[in-house]
């Protein structure tokens, strides 16, 4: 059963998501951050759909469970597109946007193929264990992709503060969720405790993005080398 | 086995991302100066802000009316300050690491001082209206 904590997280998440979409529209930056805005809008819609399914079918229903895990998978794939969008921002000046598009298509084909194989293998079987494993793997792939992007940012000495913060916030989100799902997979005893963490971590991403779009102007610059732990 | 590896790699990545993110926030405030008034609040007899001042400055910032756009930053840097303080307790015998962690704590305190400065200015502008 969901408690007030979950409803507060839901409500806060929805407000922040709507704020980001409106903020980007008002500043005419929708085109620049198209994939990010599409992802945030999709997350807001998903939040509303989750609420309707929960209200109509209940928390323990299979309808809610399927809606929750499948929409999480779709949103994670959309978030991969955001990562690829940020890759194309970073590679913009090198004129490598075609390569990024090819990599995006390959990545999507790979994820779709992997998901198809997994679903065919476990057809009609969305057990808790299966859902945890697929979520853990998807988030880990996201963390690896974002880590690659962070390495590229450091190597190319990318100085756009907004871009750097968007990438790092996404890295925190992916790796935190990969840790939580891996722990839930490894120590089912703490399921009750760890079950509360994903919604909390999910709030991190829109909150950090909202902060970046509000506080960091597009023209702000910083030296990523200053952010690496060994130098200052 | 794979799950354990994924967990360990993700923890390492999480730490690295979080440290870099928090430093990006601290760095963005590091070039901003602090008025004598805030310096007096932080360290009455010194021109520098000490590493131990973060909790007090944060508390003082919490007493001022918030602009609403810096709460997330203050909370994130607060978490970073706790992490760095914990690291300093562990790595205290290694002077090089300990010194670096101390610098980080000073950076966090400076961040809190600038946040306090901004909030004081905001309060003044509210009073002006």
Image: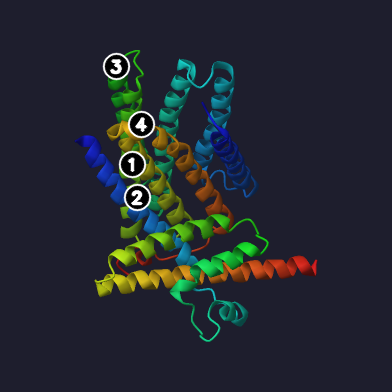
Gap between marks 1 and 4 measured at Cα = 11 Å
Q: Identify the residue under disc 2.
A: B14
Q: Earlier in the sequence, mark 1 or mark 4?
A: 4
Q: Residues within 10 Å of mark 3 (few under 14, many from 20)?
A: few
Do circles 3 and 1 both sit on a common chain?
yes
Q: Identify the residue under disc 4.
A: A135
Residue at screen point 62% across, 47% down: A23
Mark 3 vs mark 1: in front: 1
Q: Label for residue A179?
A: 1
Chain letter of mark 2 equals B
In the displayed structure, A192 sits above or below A119; it is: below
Quadrant where the N terminus of chain B sits is: top left
Gap between marks 3 and 4 measured at Cα = 15 Å
Chain letter of mark 3 equals A
Q: Identify the residue under disc 3.
A: A122
Do circles 2 and 3 both sit on a common chain?
no
Q: Residues within 10 Å of mark 1 (few under 14, many from 20)?
A: many
């Amino acid at each position: 059963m969901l408690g007030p904590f979950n409803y507060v997280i839901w409500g806060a998440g929805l407000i922040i998501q709507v704020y980001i979409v409106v903020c980007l529209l008002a500043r005419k930056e929708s085109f620049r951050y198209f994939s990010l805005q599409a992802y945030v809008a999709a997350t807001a819609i998903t939040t509303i759909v989750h609420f309707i399914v929960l209200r109509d079918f209940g928390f323990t229903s299979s309808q809610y469970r399927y809606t929750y895990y499948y929409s999480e998978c779709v949103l994670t794939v959309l978030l991969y597109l955001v990562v690829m969008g940020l890759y194309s921002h970073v590679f913009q000046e090198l004129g490598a946007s075609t390569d990024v598009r090819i990599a995006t298509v390959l990545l999507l084909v790979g994820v779709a193929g992997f998901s198809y194989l997994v679903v065919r293998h476990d057809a009609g079987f969305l057990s808790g264990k299966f859902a945890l494993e697929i979520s853990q793997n998807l988030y880990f792939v996201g963390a690896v992709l974002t880590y690659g992007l962070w390495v590229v940012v450091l190597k190319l000495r990318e100085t756009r503060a907004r871009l750097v913060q968007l990438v790092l916030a996404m890295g925190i989100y992916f790796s935190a969720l990969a840790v939580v799902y891996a722990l839930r997979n490894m120590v089912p005893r703490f399921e009750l405790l760890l079950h509360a963490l994903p919604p909390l971590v999910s709030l991190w991403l829109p909150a950090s993005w909202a902060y970046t779009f509000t506080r960091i102007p597009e023209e702000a610059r910083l030296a990523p080398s200053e952010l690496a732990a060994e130098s200052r | 086995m794979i799950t354990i590896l994924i967990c360990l790699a993700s923890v390492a990545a999480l730490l690295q991302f979080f440290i870099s993110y928090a430093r990006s926030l601290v760095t963005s405030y590091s070039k901003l100066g602090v008025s004598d008034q805030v310096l007096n609040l932080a360290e009455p007899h010194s021109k520098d802000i000490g590493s131990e001042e973060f909790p007090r400055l944060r508390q003082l910032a919490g007493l001022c009316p918030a602009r609403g756009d810096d709460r997330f930053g203050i909370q994130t840097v607060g978490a970073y300050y706790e992490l760095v303080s914990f690291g300093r307790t562990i790595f205290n015998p290694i002077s090089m690491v300990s010194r670096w962690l101390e610098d980080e704590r000073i950076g966090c305190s400076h961040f809190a001082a600038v946040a306090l400065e901004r909030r004081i200015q905001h309060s003044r502008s509210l009073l002006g209206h």
